[in-house]
Image (cartoon, rainbow, N blue to C red):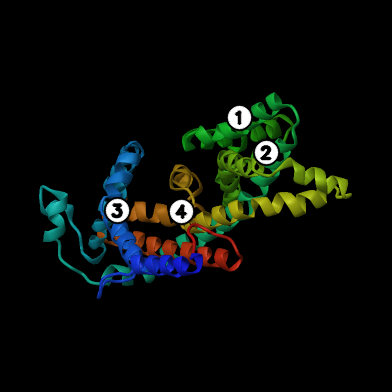
Amino acid sequence: MSHSTVPRSRAGARAGKRTPEGSPPDGATGRRAAGGAAQGAGKPAFRLRFRRDRTLILMTLPAIALLLVFTYIPVLGNVVAFQDYDPYLSDNGFVAIFESPWTGLENFRRIFADSAFWHAVQNTFVLFFLQLVLYFPIPIGLALLINSVVRPRVRAVAQAVMYLPHFFSWVLVVTVFQQIFGGAGIIAQTLRQHGHQGIDLMTDPGIFKFLVTAEGVWKDAGWGIIVFLAALSAVSPDLYEAAAMDGAGRWRRMWHITLPALRPVIALLLVLRVGDALTVGFEQLLLQRDAVGPGAAEVLDTYVWWNGIRNQDFGYAAAAGLIKGVVGLGLVLTANKVAHLMGEQGVYEK
């Protein structure tokens, strides 16, 4: 009796699982239903994310507005690089763009034939190289020193003192260096008191670039220290303890633990620094240009300012600025590619 009942129950089960002719199997139906549900869920996904993150999105609106007004919209003004732009052709400077005559590539030909332009390029790259050589070792070394301080209060005070110059204006920074290295500064007065002739290092073209580099390092080293300290705080102390138990000294721990932890940050800052290779301190150099002369202090930014604002040659200055922007973009893309080849992320992922 039991033997005859089991086949019928199995047959009934199989019969119950049969689908009408032409209908897909249950698995295909489930997959199709799931796909339809996913498509339906994808439509309001943006609205759901917006409702979820609306506070963060609203907080970014002022920054987006600033970028649009002061960065992206002014990019459209690069059209005057191909014109003999004259803002006095109309009461509205924007309308004057449409009334100014087109010159094609004439402004660019004038720039490449100008020896003053190439001299400004040379000064720009020399200052960039000096800043790059000192920009990373000094903040990294100071960050390691501060990180090794045991007492938190002493560490906080040292960090605040080193970061404070970052908030100084360039007028104040140049004034401080003028009071030390200028003709009436501390060094010159000390030499005179001892019977020697006073010297004005701030107007000496031979060492001017080194003083400019020192000004930049003193002002911006604190920002680099903060960044590297943040990276060091992510390193687990257990790694140092395990390395010390294995007999690794201070230098070996720094070489095999600390520096590898800083590599991603160093790569990112290096890419950003290379992208700013042609921007080496407009305000800083403009304040000192007249004192030391354009031969030592003329860089691309001051060159553009002098021709655009002082000489009223707006098309020429716009062409020089456009060249600077294109070259800067190429430099940051190249540096980012090198970072990828070295196994680092850079500014953006591959």
In three-dimensional space, the C-alpha distance between marks 4 and 2, rounded to whole angstroms, equals 36 Å
Residue 84 versus residue 255: which sits nearer the camera? 255
Indicate which label's residue lies in the foreground, 4 or 2. 4
Q: Amino acid at mark 1?
A: Ala
- How far is disc 2 from disc 1 in space, using C-alphas? 38 Å
Estimate the spatial distance between the alpha carbons at disc 2 and disc 3, rounded to whole Å.
Answer: 82 Å
Q: Vertical placement of 228 versus 43: above or below?
A: above
Q: Earlier in the sequence, mark 3 or mark 4?
A: 3
Sequence-first tag of 3 and 1: 3
Mark positioned earlier in the residue sequence (2 or 1):
1
Residue 60 x, y percent position in the rendering: 34, 41
List the residue tagged with mark 1. Answer: 160
Task: Confirm or deny contact between disc 2 and disc 1 (CB under 8 A).
Answer: no
Residue 279 - label: 4
Side of 259 where 17 appears, left or right: left
Q: Secondary structure at mark 3?
A: helix
**Mark 2 or mark 3: which comes first in sequence?**
3
Q: Is label 1 or label 4 in front?
A: 1
The mark closer to the camera, 3 or 1, is 3
Going by the numbered disc 4, the residue's amino acid type is Thr
Q: Where is residue 198, by image quadrant? A: top right
**Residue that label 2 marks:** 197
The amino acid at mark 3 is: Ala
- Taking the spot 20% from the left edge, 63% from the top edge, the residue there is 84
Which residue, given by chain and number where applicable, does mark 3 sit on? 41
User: Which of these two is toward me, 125 or 165?
Assistant: 165
